[in-house]
Image (cartoon, grey):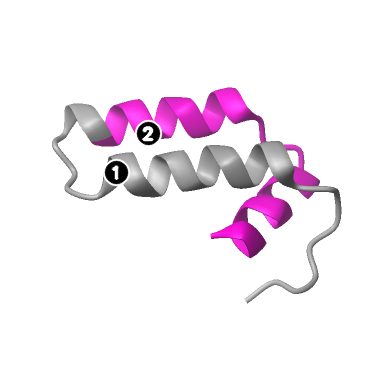
Amino acid sequence: MDVHVKKYKEQGGTMEEIMEALLVAAVTRSGAILSHGVNALLAYRDAPGKPDCFC
């Protein structure tokens, strides 16, 4: 999760866009959205800049 979010952030993605995707998934009743969504938001907040790698 951290690597993908770091790359997303590097390319100009915003936390608001992550939140929007999280809410859309929650509305459509996606199963693990809360745990993955929280992990994505924390990774975005803590991302120092460029990712170590991109898988």
In this view, the residue in front, 36 or 30, is: 36
Mark toward the start of the polypeptide (1 vs 2): 2
Q: Are marks 1 and 2 in contact (CB under 8 Å)?
A: yes
Structural crowding at the residue carrying mark 2, measured as other residues with C-alpha within 10 Å and reported as few (<14), some (14–19) or many (≥20): some
**Magenta span:** 1-25
In the picture shown, does residue 38 fall above or below 16?
below
Question: Which residue lies at the image location 52% right of the left edge and 45% below the top edge?
Answer: 40
Residue 18 within the magenta-colored segment of the rendering: yes
In the rendered structure, the answer to whether residue 23 lies left or right of residue 44 reads: left
Question: Which residue lies at the image location 54% right of the left edge and 29% below the top edge?
Answer: 17
Question: Which residue lies at the image location 84% right of the left edge and 48% below the top edge?
Answer: 48
Locate residue 28: give its quadrant. Answer: top left
Name the amino acid type tagged 2: Leu
Name the amino acid type tagged 1: Ile
In the rendered structure, the answer to whether residue 44 lies left or right of residue 34 reads: right
Question: Which mark, residue 33?
Answer: 1
Q: Could you say where residue 15 lies in the image, as x and y percent from the top left? A: 61, 29
Q: Could you say where residue 47 lies in the image, as x and y percent from the top left? A: 75, 47
In this view, the residue in front, 7 or 38, is: 38
- Determine whether the residue tagged by mark 1 lies in a helix, strand or loop: helix
Structural crowding at the residue carrying mark 1, measured as other residues with C-alpha within 10 Å and reported as few (<14), some (14–19) or many (≥20): some
Q: Which residue is mark 2?
A: 22
